[in-house]
Image (spheres, helix red, strand yellow):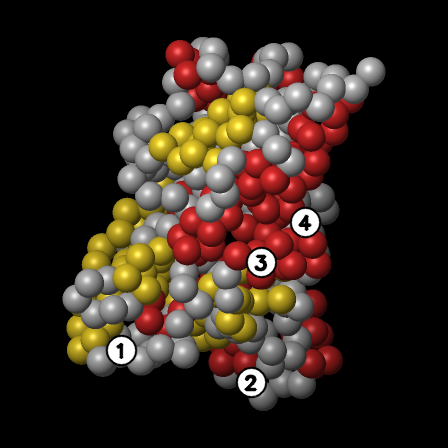
Amino acid sequence: MTTRRARRIGIAGAGFSGAVIARQLAEAGHDVVVFEARDHVAGNCHTERDPATGVMIHRYGPHIFHTADERVWSYVNRFGAMVAFNHRVRTTVQGRVYLLPVNLLTINQLFGTTLGPDEARALIAREADSSIGEPQNFEEQALKFMGRRLYEAFFLGYTRKQWGLAPSEIPAAVLKRLPLRFTYEDSYFNHPHQAIPRDGYTAVVAAILDHPGIEVRLSTPYTEADRADFDHSVWSGPLDAWFSHRYGRLGYRTLDFEEIRAEGDHLGCAVMNYGDLEVPYTRIAEHKHFAPWEEHAETVCFRETSRLAGEGDTPYYPIRLAQDKSLLGRYVDAARVEPDVTFVGRLGTYRYLDMDVTIGEALTAADGILHAFEHGTAVPSLFVDA
């Protein structure tokens, strides 16, 4: 048996997850209301023109779109002009500037050598700690693959600041692959599509939400009382918040931003990391360099400092340490049996997601919701393993 009646859908969050699902459901003929607690769309990808300089500001920190997913790439290009952007990062440690990710130039700079690729591989093999068997934490993982000098220069201080923990307390899985390149390639990402929207991310998300079947309610959180007005809910807020933190609070990191204004350039690049533990912030981003096709006489930068998110803070990324994974399991079990709601996005599934993955999973979730509506079956609460 199938049912084709139009459904009424309530979506919490006007970031990429909520917007993409809203658009897909609206294009299929359903009535969608998007609730957004902030006074703007696009979530943490929100961009806006600085009124004093005209610089396009990434209000919640830099976002660079990169993907190998052709469906996602085609999708975002429907809603905004994507301009090629090759992201390059520098880091200041021990009074010198180096390239990131660690590449052949970085290695030669640090060791004071002029090695070729094979020679550099041999050097790192000698530096690596072969006494470590199966790494039990981030620090052991780093020492096993790159040795102490590279680890202490580029990962120890930055990691402590970013996570608020000693690397020996962080799971080895956080360092997913050896972050070394034995060439002079310094592009931060290696995906075939790398770009930034010419008019900013907020314009893209606003275009996605621009459909007669979608109503957007800004400065309006989605509440339990609202749920009764809809056939189905989509939740992109924190997973534990949906359940009113009944088992306890999942851990998130947040960011504090300190503004810097100046004439001309301040950094000379888009992002400068600071690896020394004595420097309290993790990086400075100079936002006009994220739009090199524009020219601005003045500049706006932001220093970023990471800390544990409190109750009133904006959560940026999940911590996912051992205690969080145990608590997460309880919330995932509760989510899987929660009727008439789908959990999506970085916060709704408690995972660190890049923008392209967020959009791809939102498209998959929308496909699944529409399939369930079409066939009269229950909509799965999670389309991924959180």
* Label 1 to label 2: alpha-carbon separation: 39 Å
For disc 2, the marked residue is 113
Q: Residues within 10 Å of mark 2 (few under 14, many from 20)?
A: few
Residue 319 against residue 193 in the figure, above or below: above
SS for dot 4: loop
* Label 3 to label 2: alpha-carbon separation: 48 Å
For disc 4, the marked residue is 132
Camera-nearest label, 3 or 4:
3
For disc 1, the marked residue is 296
* Label 4 to label 2: alpha-carbon separation: 27 Å
Side (left or right) of 27 relative to 297? right
The kind of residue on which mark 3 rests is Arg
SS for dot 1: loop
User: Which residue shows up at 73% across the image and 80% down it?
Assistant: 118
Residue 194 against residue 34 in the figure, above or below: below
Q: Which mark is residue 78?
A: 3
SS for dot 3: helix
Say if mark 3 contacts mark 4, CB within 8 Å: no
User: Which residue shows up at 42% across the image and 16% down it?
Assistant: 226
The kind of residue on which mark 2 rests is Thr
Residue 236 against residue 124 in the figure, above or below: above
The kind of residue on which mark 1 rests is His
SS for dot 2: loop
